[in-house]
Amino acid sequence: MSDPYFQKLFAERIGGENYGKGTAIYKFEKIKRAKRKALADYPDRQLIDFGIGENDEMAPESVRKVMAEEINKPENRGYADNGVAEFKKAAADYMKRMFGVELDAATEVNHCIGSKTALAMLPACFINPGDICLMTVPGYPVAGTHAAYYGGTVYKLPLLAENDFFPDLDGIPAEVKEKAKLLVINYPNSPTGKVATKEFYEKVVKFAKDNNLVVVQDAAHTVLTFEGEPLSFLSVPGAKDVGVEVHSLSKGFDMIGWRIGWVCGNPLLVQAFSDVKDNCDSGQFIAIQKAAAAALASEAIPKQTNAKYERRLKKLVDMLNRCGFQCKMPGGTYFLYTKSPSGVEGGPSFANAEEASQYLITEKSICTVPWDDAGAFLRFSVTYVAADEAAEDALMEETEKRLKQISLKFD
């Protein structure tokens, strides 16, 4: 069958004339296929899913109640455009209460339809062909993907254990710094679980000023901080002069599918984001914004979410250590990032984390996410479905039983 006439019209950013003809399979698609096969091959064996990365509970009842009320109000039916004042004020109040960060709700805050869309839009404010976007890896690739869409280049900053999972800013070549316009960071970091320090953020501020670039700090997991108090980039002196912080209600407020977050920081940078956003969407449904405002006003919701995932992570760390892994509690996020096994006693060896992950799902119906960007690591998420602590304990017991059946090796 011949190609359609438009085959040669696809943009190079998505593959050009070869779009749709590639055979490479995206990592998460491989995991989905392996899960389907495990369920088909072993229908009576429970699939233990540490691979998912989305909260297992609905948004709190109090938030859903506000949504139910607001959805029927005719004044909420129209376009939200760049957001409603009620949500912006709630976000500003939250930043003050949680981090001591003072923000002008009218000029230094704007909502986004989830942090993903904000990270996709921000490169449009800065990246021209030939510009460089500095990105930490492993990590969430959206900002880098869109920087490349605009003709920019992504320069990867590996997060290595020997650097305590911080990027080596001092090691960036001069010619790269000269062309860099954006530095995208993410703390608490997904997937490593590392939390930022004030000293690190101070270094980032100085780096940005010395090299005339803008900082985008992805703070989606900030509520899930277990090591010390949650820290905002904007709480560091000078941070508002060089960047913005992107927040989300997905992780800390169980509002994954609601798609609501905000960008805050330097007013001119927030304005630039707002101008791009005006040409991309017409705002999130006003009822969702008002329900999110109610969520942000609650001190109990983030505390409850934090306590739940910290409890689950502690159980997971203890269980995996009994099975030969060498891991410790992450400083934040609901992910555990740990060195991948190198093989199985008397069985196969694993060349990388992907092979280890595929073995675990195929042989033991244990789903994980492999990361091979900066060494071989597996990511375990504690967002599995469990109704109560007894169910959590039962899942840990079953996982330990299966892992001990295969005697994993670690180099």
Image (cartoon, grey):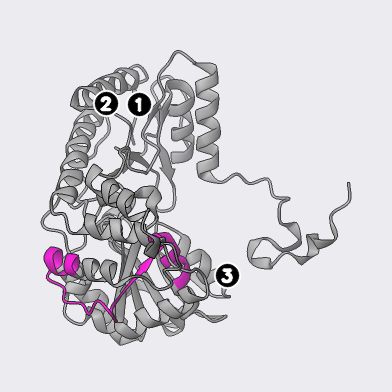
Callouts 2 and 1 close, C-beta under 8 Å: yes
Q: CA distance from mark 2 to mark 3?
A: 44 Å
Closer-to-camera residue (230/81): 81
Image coordinates of residue 34 in percent, x first then y, are 53, 30
Q: Amino acid at mark 3?
A: Tyr
Residue 370 location (% of width, % of height)? 43, 42
The x, y position of residue 47, in whole percent, is 41, 24
**Can you identify the residue that label 2 sits on?**
323
Q: Mark 2, mark 1: which one is toward the viewer?
A: 2
Residue 315 seen from this side? yes
Query: Please, which residue is most extreme toward the top here?
Result: 44
Q: Earlier in the sequence, mark 2 or mark 1?
A: 2
Q: How many marks?
A: 3
Describe residue 350's horizontal placement relative to residue 405 as left or right: right
Q: Quadrant of residue 341?
A: top left
Q: Residues within 10 Å of mark 3 (few under 14, many from 20)?
A: some
Work out how far the residue at label 3 is from the one at label 1, CA to CA, in angstroms: 42 Å
Give the magenta-colored segment's residue range. Answer: 93-121
- Counting residues from the N terminus, which is met first, the one under dot 3 or under dot 1? 3
Mark 1: few, some, or many residues within 10 Å (few <14, many ≥20)? Answer: many
Whether residue 297 appears in magenta in the rendering, the answer is: no
Labels 3, 1: front one:
3
